[in-house]
């Protein structure tokens, strides 16, 4: 049986071998059932035809790193940085993450849900069919739980896949400014046991001004006892040791990596730790891009993500992230498209996403363009036409 048959596809990027021309794609229920020539396609029956008119088709985007749930915005800090202040300076003065924490603590669960749903739908309309969502703007048990409940509600109600990460160790909250060990105690002893059932992963921002390698090691050890995999904010503002820690503990990913070296990359490759790269943050902070080509050369799986957050990367769509990865990070178009789809899925342990093959979950994009190169080539246009998630046309 075929429920949907996509015909007259110009370029089909499957991530399962070379791009194909003149292929058709059949979907049965929520899975792909056939990819090949029209003449061998399975019987359509009452199924529907999606006529692609020579457009390119690719897997749905997998956005493997977002801070989707927050209240308020920080456009004032954006302007201050343009006038010369640095991200770290503003954070040290109580702005940065802490200002979003204040706004988020003041918001109700319903308000946070509504804000996040609107952002998620803008992502979906831009072709994203899987997202990772972090907490991290609560920094107390009650608010972190509220954020994780919102994330679970997103997972239950959106027509896409949502993976959830606890980021209680995003920064030291104001009330623990003089007792950082007290806050780490709180994360491991009070928060982790309560939040673990609501999350898949634990993340720590390893950085000067946030958490040390030793503090992070302690948090990840307890998180692992609760069954949470590790994702690490590493080497974003300086080379601080997060990438090596990620490799040491077998983290599923180390993210950002703007200051990572070949040594870091080799350790991560040996450990099977994915590199999740967020060129939108480097763009917004006007800082160095992560060494994407070097990470690939070392043998790492690389993923591209928006890092959607109100401070460093208020990007909701993946297409401009692909543009930045090509124009500023030095990836090829094929590498960037792979990283924005299959690479992200691999970093989330989702073997049946980011790939168009029989049996995989039917998540795809029909572009309003003949080839995927048009995504970075026309960076300011949303070229996403039809979006299918789990076999359902959602845009
Ligand atoms: O990924 N690096 C830490 N976390 C975020 C920034 C959060 C914020 O500034 O609100 C990031 O860039
Ligand atoms: Fe981040």
Image (cartoon, helix red, strand yellow):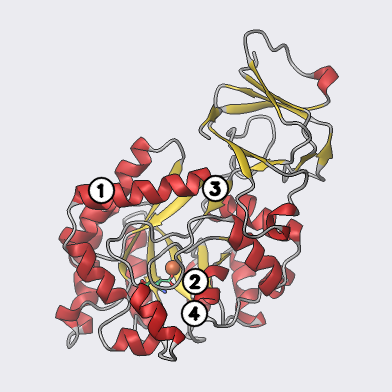
Q: Quadrant of residue 144?
A: bottom left
Image height of 110 relative to 267, above or below: above
Secondary structure state at the residue bearing disc 3: loop
The structure residue drawn at horizontal position 46% and vertical position 39%, both measured from the top left corner, is 160
The x, y position of residue 92, in whole percent, is 30, 88
Structural distance between the alpha carbons of marks 3 and 2: 31 Å
Residue annotated with mark 3: 126
Residue assigned mark 1: 149
Q: Residue at x 34, y 37 (%)?
A: 156
Residue 228 position in % (x across, y down): 37, 56
Mark 3 and mark 4: Cα distance apart in space: 23 Å
Q: Earlier in the sequence, mark 3 or mark 2?
A: 3
Q: Position of residue 83 (x, y in %)?
A: 43, 89
Cα distance in 3D space between marks 1 and 3:
25 Å
Q: Which residue position is annotated with label 4?
A: 285
Q: Are marks 2 and 4 in contact (CB under 8 Å)?
A: no
């Amino acid at each position: 049986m075929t429920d949907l048959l996509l015909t007259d596809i110009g370029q089909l990027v499957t991530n399962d071998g070379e791009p194909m021309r003149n292929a058709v794609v059949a979907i049965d229920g929520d899975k792909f059932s056939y990819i090949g020539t029209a003449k061998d396609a399975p019987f359509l029956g009452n199924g529907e035809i999606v006529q692609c008119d020579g457009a390119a088709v690719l897997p749905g985007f997998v956005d493997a790193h977002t801070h989707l749930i927050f209240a308020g915005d920080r456009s004032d800090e954006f302007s201050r940085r343009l006038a010369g202040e640095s991200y770290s300076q503003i954070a040290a003065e109580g702005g940065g993450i802490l200002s979003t924490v204040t706004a988020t603590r003041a918001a109700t669960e319903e308000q946070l849900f509504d804000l996040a749903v609107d952002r998620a739908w803008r992502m979906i309309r831009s072709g994203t069919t899987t997202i990772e969502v972090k907490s991290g703007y609560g920094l107390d048990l009650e608010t972190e739980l509220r954020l994780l409940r919102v994330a679970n509600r997103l997972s239950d109600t959106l027509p896409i896949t949502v993976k959830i990460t606890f980021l209680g160790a995003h920064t030291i909250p104001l009330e623990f400014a003089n007792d950082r060990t007290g806050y780490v105690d709180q994360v491991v002893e009070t928060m982790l046991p309560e939040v673990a059932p609501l999350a898949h992963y634990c993340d720590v921002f390893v950085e000067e001004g946030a958490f040390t390698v030793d503090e992070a090691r302690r948090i990840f050890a307890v998180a692992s006892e609760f069954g949470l995999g590790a994702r690490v904010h590493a080497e974003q503002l300086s080379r601080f040791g997060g990438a090596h820690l990620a490799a040491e503990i077998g983290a599923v990913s180390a993210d950002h990596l703007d200051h990572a070296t070949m040594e870091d990359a080799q350790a991560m490759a040996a450990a099977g730790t994915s590199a999740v790269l967020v060129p939108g943050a480097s763009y917004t902070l006007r800082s160095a891009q992560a060494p994407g080509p070097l990470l690939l050369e070392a043998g790492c799986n690389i993923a591209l993500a928006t890092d959607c957050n109100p401070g460093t990367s208020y990007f909701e769509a993946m297409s401009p992230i692909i543009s930045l990865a090509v124009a500023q990070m030095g990836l090829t178009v094929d590498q960037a498209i792979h990283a924005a789809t299959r690479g992200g899925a691999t970093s989330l342990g989702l073997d049946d996403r980011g790939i168009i093959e029989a049996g995989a979950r039917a998540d795809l994009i029909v572009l309003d363009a003949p080839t995927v190169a048009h995504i970075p080539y026309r960076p300011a246009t949303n070229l996403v036409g039809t979006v299918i998630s789990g076999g359902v046309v959602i845009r």
